[in-house]
Amino acid sequence: MTPTRLRTLVGAAVVLGALTWGLLHVLDSSGDASGIPAVPWTGPLGLLLLAVGIAALALSLRSRLRGDVGTKPIPALAAARMVVLAKATSHTGAVLCGLYLGLAAFVLVDIGLSSSAARSLTALGGVIASVLLTVAGLVLERVLRLPDDDVPLDPTAPAGGAVR
C-alpha cells in the first residue's frame, strides 16, 4: 500500500467542494428551497471528537512501536488494520472537507440572512473539523510507516534477514 498523497486529498476536497456548490446552486435557482439541507452542529462536533480519538490512537501506537517501557508490542495484523483505518480516515476527512467547503461557499453568499449565518458557522466548523480529521489520519499513517528498506539483504543471513 502506497502512502497517501496530499495532492490526492486536496484534489478530492476541491472537486467535491465544486460539485456540492454547483448542486446547491442548481437547487436554489430552481426555487426548491426545501432541497437545501440544514446542517446540524453535531456533525462537526462528531468529526472533531473522531479526530481527537484518532490522534490519541496515533500517540499511543507511536510509544508502543518505539518499545517504550511498559508497553506491549503491536501484532502485525493489528498494525495493518490501523494502516487501513489511517487511510480511510484521511480520505473521509478530505471528502467531508469538500462537502463542507461547497456548503460554506454557497451559504456565505447570503450571510445577511439569520438562517445563513447559523449555517455558515456550522459549515466553517465542519471544514475545520474535517481538516483536523484528515491531519489525524495522516499522522496515524506516518506513525505506522515502516522504515525504508534501502539496505541490501545479506545472502548469508537467515531467510528475510537484513543487515542494519
Image: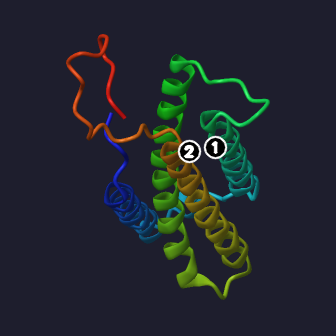
Task: Residue 10: give x, y in percent of width and height.
Answer: 38, 62
Q: Amino acid at mark 2?
A: Leu
Report crowding for label 1: few under 14, some 14 to 19, many 20 or more residues within 10 A (C-alpha).
many
Residue that numbered label 1 is attached to? 58
Residue situated furthest top in the rendering:
159
State the residue in front, 92 or 26.
92
Labelled disc at residue 140: 2
Amino acid marked by disc 1: Ala
Who's the residue at 62% across and 66% down the image? 128
The image position of residue 145, as x and y in percent, is 45, 40
Q: Secondary structure at mark 2?
A: helix
Q: How far is mark 1 from mark 2, CA to CA?
A: 5 Å
Q: Cβ–Cβ below 8 Å for labels 1 and 2?
A: yes
Question: Which x, y percent locates residue 36?
Answer: 56, 60
Measured as percent of width and height from the top left, residue 87 is found at: 46, 40
Would you say 10 lies left or right of 116 here? left
Which image quarter holds the C terminus?
A: top left
Q: Earlier in the sequence, mark 1 or mark 2?
A: 1
Q: Residues within 10 Å of mark 2 (few under 14, many from 20)?
A: many
Which quadrant of the rendered structure holds the N terminus? top left
Residue drawn at 49 percent across, 43 percent down: 141
